[in-house]
Amino acid sequence: MIQTFAPIASLLFSVALLMAGHGLQSTIVPLASKGMAFADFSIGLAASAYFAGFVLGGIITPHVVVRAGHIRGFAVMVSSMSAAALLHPLVSDQYAWIFFRLITGFSMAGLYLIIESWLNEFADNTNRGLVMSAYIIVNYAAYTFGQLLATVAEPEKFFLFAIASIIISVAVVPVAMTKAAQPAPIAVVKLELRKVFRISPAAIVSATVVGLVQGSHVSFAAIYAVDKGYDSLSQAPIFAAILGIGGIAGQWPIGRISDRFDRRLVLIVISLFGIAGSFAITLVEEASFASLLLAGFFIGAMIQPAYSLAAAHGYDHASDSGYVRMAAGLLVAFGIGSSIGPTVTSLAMSAWGPEALFLLPSVALATLCLFLTKRILTQEAIELDDKDDFEFASTTAAIGAVVTPELLSEEDKYVVVPDEWEASEDEEPEEAGQEGKEPVQEDSQDAQPSAEPA
């Protein structure tokens, strides 16, 4: 056990710091926006900008790493994210905040890809599950801790933004001091939704809808609590955190159930439960904060694992050589849904009140149920023996980056291995990074799916 975690201890510590700062920032930004009387639409645009930046970061970051190396790339992303956190209280303009959230999303995607490529380098087939599960647990725990930090001061004050910036900045220290060798393989995110959709329409549509729903919940949960009359300091951040805690609790048992049944059917069932919980939460009165937390926990437990099932279903239908493309396609689909959801939800909340946060996503989930029902009736389920076992690491929406069921292969056309960047003072950067200019060579044939599209 010690031999497994000793080489990655500093990296996991950096992850914990990053996610704590990120969780704090993600919670106080919408609350501060509300406190500063920003329009709901601009709050929604800022949330959408984060997810749009996340998709862009996933596409561009591999090329940054090829040119600059992992440690330099990591430092660039951390610095950008830290600066964006500090700029919020310094520039009290709702449109500027949209740009700051775009930068934050871009940086987070880059950090995920760099970190996970490093972890992939340390893992092998005997310990990969342990390493990646530890990584995800650290992510969840630190992010939730960051959300709860929002209860120590008023969200629109400089103090909390400064704390978020400091925590994020310190995260670069353990990585900068690491003796871990680079390079490590890094996944290349490509916009190939059409190809991935042909392999598994159900996976891509589900990932998009779940992105829309989760993007809305993550962005507006705290604001919903405030609009319903709960305290913005002591209660709203806790409600925002409880949705994620419910998601953690539901991931593993629901994933294991999906190993025994058609994953599309399990997706329908948890979506229906999520819809029921969404209607129930709108009936909770202000006097019962405990009831609100219980309903939020249930909704999180039902809805957040849905991305995991979509990803697992996609991997069931992808060939071994197509895992990275499937993971990247799911990431892009989830990002598109997450980019749309907050903006649409903000308009709905302005028109119909805070209840729209849960009622509008319910409409999206109901539509998904109809689509999946049609797929079940027209496409047979994959045989149980042909399924990949549910893997927590490679199907977790909260992580969002390209984590696949198998180790990244250097032969995969969607994986690039940067050369170690050792430019000397008299060496031109173009020469130092020349070999990384064309990291991806397209094969003449695409990997074929291992089963009929579903």
Image (cartoon, helix red, strand yellow):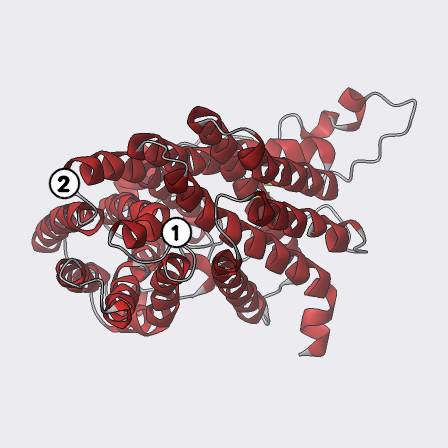
Q: Where does the image place residue 122, in percent across and percent down from the top left?
A: 67, 61
Residue type at tag 1: Ser
- Find residue 352 and name its label: 2
- Mark 2 Cα-neighbour bin, 10 Å: few <14, some 14–19, many ≥20: few
Closest to the observer: 359 or 201?
A: 359
Q: Is residue 50 visible?
A: yes
The residue furthest bottom is 1
Q: Is 32 on the left-hand or right-hand side of 129?
A: left
Closest to the observer: 370 or 404?
A: 370
Q: Residue at x 25, y 49 (%)?
A: 206
Q: Where does the image place residue 326, in percent across and percent down from the top left?
A: 39, 46
The residue furthest right is 426
Q: Residue at x 49, y 53 (%)?
A: 403
- Find residue 319 and name its label: 1
Q: Where does the image place residue 440, in percent across and percent down from the top left?
A: 57, 32
Q: Residue at x 54, y 35 (%)?
A: 88
Viewport quadrant of the N terminus: bottom right
Secondary structure type for disc 1: loop
Q: Is 316 on the left-hand or right-hand side of 432?
A: left
Discs 1/2, front: 2
- Residue 429, located in which quarter of the rendered image? top right
- Mark 1 Cα-neighbour bin, 10 Å: few <14, some 14–19, many ≥20: some
Residue type at tag 2: Trp
Cα distance in 3D space between marks 1 and 2: 45 Å
Closest to the observer: 17 or 411?
A: 17
- Residue 256, located in which quarter of the rendered image? bottom left
